[in-house]
């Protein structure tokens, strides 16, 4: 059973905490400014908002440690930047962040990023098992496989895979993919889609699958059906 959403915040302002408690008392909010992610079993969807600058280390390094720790490896990480600097955005995604935004954080931006009213489930997809060639996806189990071998995917990459399997041989623009993930109100841009697609490709290839995704210049991406 999916547990409550866990929200991880670094050095949050007291006013932000009070607003989140008032607006979403069901959230499991954990605040920390240490050098390591929280340990232990974090039930339910986990969302982390990491400040670019922290007292003890950089936000980039903490983001990398989030990806290495078993408790936060699959968390959705948003880097909170000090400005809309393109290099900072690039470095955030390279360090393992799923997205970024310019701070300071407000309760409104946090709840918008988490999905508003669908926060408790993170709009988790469900449905029958899907198959395209040797690649399979089980939405109910949130699990992907290649020839029976589990392919570890983060939530956004898994949702992309499901979308592509459901619509093979169709080219989708980056904006269309943002819409398919229902992220059009979350401040996600086209550069982030490229990162998600790249991670999906690498995950499939690292588990033996040939790259099924094709980039169509100036248009977007398509997953080709296997040759008969």
Image (spheres, grey):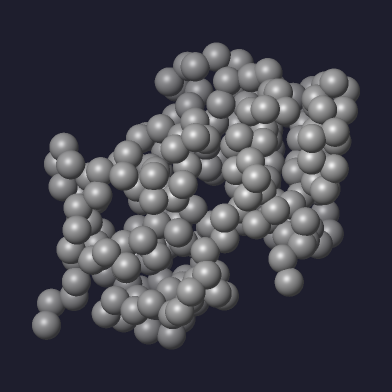
Residue 147, horizontal then vertical, whole percent: 37, 84
Tell me where residue 62 sits by quadrant. Answer: top right
Task: Name the outermost residue toward the bottom.
Answer: 148
Tell me where residue 115 sits by quadrant. Answer: top right
For the N terminus, give its image quadrant: bottom right
Give above or below for 61 relative to 15.
below
**Residue 72 appears in the rendering:** no
Give above or below for 139 relative to 110.
below
Of 226 and 3, the residue lying toward us = 3
Residue 70, horizontal then vertical, whole percent: 70, 60
Q: Describe residue 42's horizontal placement relative to residue 204 as left or right.
A: right
Residue 21, horizontal then vertical, whole percent: 85, 36
At horizontal 38% and vertical 77% (from top left) the residue drawn is 130
Task: Name the outermost residue toward the left.
Answer: 228
Q: Describe residue 143's horizontal placement relative to residue 162 as left or right.
A: right
Residue 84, horizontal then vertical, whole percent: 49, 17
At horizontal 46% and vertical 61% (from top left) the residue drawn is 158
**Residue 134 appears in the rendering:** yes
Marker count (numbered): 0
At horizontal 18% and vertical 42% (from top left) the residue drawn is 219
Give above or below for 16 relative to 136.
above
At horizontal 47% and vertical 16% (from top left) the residue drawn is 85
For the C terminus, give its image quadrant: bottom left
Q: Describe residue 71's horizontal placement relative to residue 125 as left or right.
A: right
């Amino acid at each position: 059973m999916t547990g409550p959403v866990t929200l991880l915040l670094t050095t949050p302002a007291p006013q932000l905490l009070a607003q989140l408690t008032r607006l979403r008392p069901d959230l499991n909010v954990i605040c920390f400014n240490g050098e390591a992610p929280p340990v232990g079993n974090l039930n339910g969807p986990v969302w982390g908002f990491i400040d670019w600058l922290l007292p003890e280390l950089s936000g980039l390094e903490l983001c990398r440690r989030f990806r290495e720790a078993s408790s936060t490896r699959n968390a959705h990480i948003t880097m909170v930047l000090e400005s809309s600097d393109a290099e900072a955005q690039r470095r955030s995604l390279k360090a393992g962040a799923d997205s970024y935004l310019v701070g300071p954080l407000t309760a409104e931006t946090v709840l918008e990023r988490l999905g508003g009213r669908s926060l408790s489930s993170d709009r988790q997809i469900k449905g029958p098992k899907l198959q395209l060639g040797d690649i399979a996806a089980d939405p109910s189990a949130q699990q992907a496989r290649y020839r029976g071998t589990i392919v570890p995917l983060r939530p956004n990459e898994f949702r992309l895979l499901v979308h592509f399997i459901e619509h093979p041989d169709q080219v989708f623009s980056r904006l269309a993919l943002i819409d398919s993930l229902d992220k059009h109100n979350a401040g996600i841009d086209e550069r982030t889609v490229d990162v998600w697609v790249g991670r999906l490709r690498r995950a499939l290839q690292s588990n033996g699958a040939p790259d099924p995704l094709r980039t169509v210049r100036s248009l977007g991406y398509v997953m080709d059906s296997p040759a008969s």
